[in-house]
Image: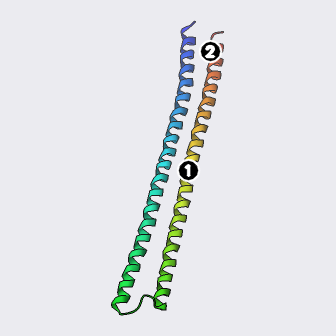
Amino acid sequence: MSFLVAMQVMSTGLAISSALSKGNAEATAYEMDAREQENRIANEKIIAQQRHNDRVDEFSSSQKVNEAYFAFLGRDVSDRSFIAFEKKNKETAYSDLRRSNFQSLIEIGQMRSQAEQDRFSGRMAIKKSRTEAMMAAVSGFSNISKTSV
């Protein structure tokens, strides 16, 4: 085998190896991005639960303050105006909770979608690298056959 053919064989091998390595590296990077999205999902769930608990605590505290204030004013907590006031506060609090929970669900859905998109991109990077490796092999072997003639 001539020196030129040997160099072309090595060059072809390196091109194939390089294409496959590049695809694997890209797929690994995309997988890491997808895992980061999954971590963000877990964090968002915790944050959503904390917001929920904080709003419930805030409502409970507000309710106690209102009862104490009404008692200080010498008004009965069974008063219709107080009951209506508390009912409105409760509706507002639960509306806030629903809105916050819905917002978290939307954000989690977006993060899941991004994670799936990252994984898809990783799979496509692998396929692309295999195609590039195959093209390098065909091109390299074609050059080798031209040189060895």
The x, y position of residue 46, in whole percent, is 44, 57
* Residue drawn at the location 41% of the way across and 79% of the way down: 63
List the single residue furthest toward the bottom: 74
Q: Name the residue under label 1.
A: 114
Q: Which circle marks residue 4 in the picture?
A: none
Marks 2 and 1 close (CB-CB < 8 Å): no
Within 10 Å of disc 2 (Cα), the crowding (few <14, some 14-19, many 20+) is some
* Residue drawn at the location 48% of the way across and 86% of the way down: 83
Against 90, is 118 above or below?
Answer: above
List the single residue furthest toward the left: 72
Q: Which is nearer the N-term, disc 2 or disc 1?
A: 1
The x, y position of residue 70, in whole percent, is 38, 89
Against 105, is 145 above or below?
Answer: above
Please identify, in this view, whether the residue under mark 2 or under mark 1 is nearer the observer: 1
Quarter placement of the N terminus: top right
Against 149, is 67 above or below?
Answer: below
Quarter placement of the C terminus: top right
- Considering depth in this image, is 7 or 111 the residue closer to the camera? 111
Against 39, is 70 above or below?
Answer: below
Q: In this view, does 44 lie to the left or right of 4?
A: left
Q: The residue under label 2 is which amino acid type? A: Ile
Q: Name the residue under label 2.
A: 144
User: Where is residue 133, by image quadrant?
Assistant: top right
* Residue drawn at the location 46% of the way across and 49% of the way down: 39
Q: In whole angstroms, how far apart are the C-alphas of marks 2 and 1?
A: 44 Å
Q: In this view, does 71 lie to the left or right of 142?
A: left
* Residue drawn at the location 40% of the way across and 73% of the way down: 58
- Considering depth in this image, is 119 or 69 the residue closer to the camera? 69
Within 10 Å of disc 1 (Cα), the crowding (few <14, some 14-19, many 20+) is some
Q: Element under label 2?
A: helix
Q: The residue under label 1 is which amino acid type? A: Gln
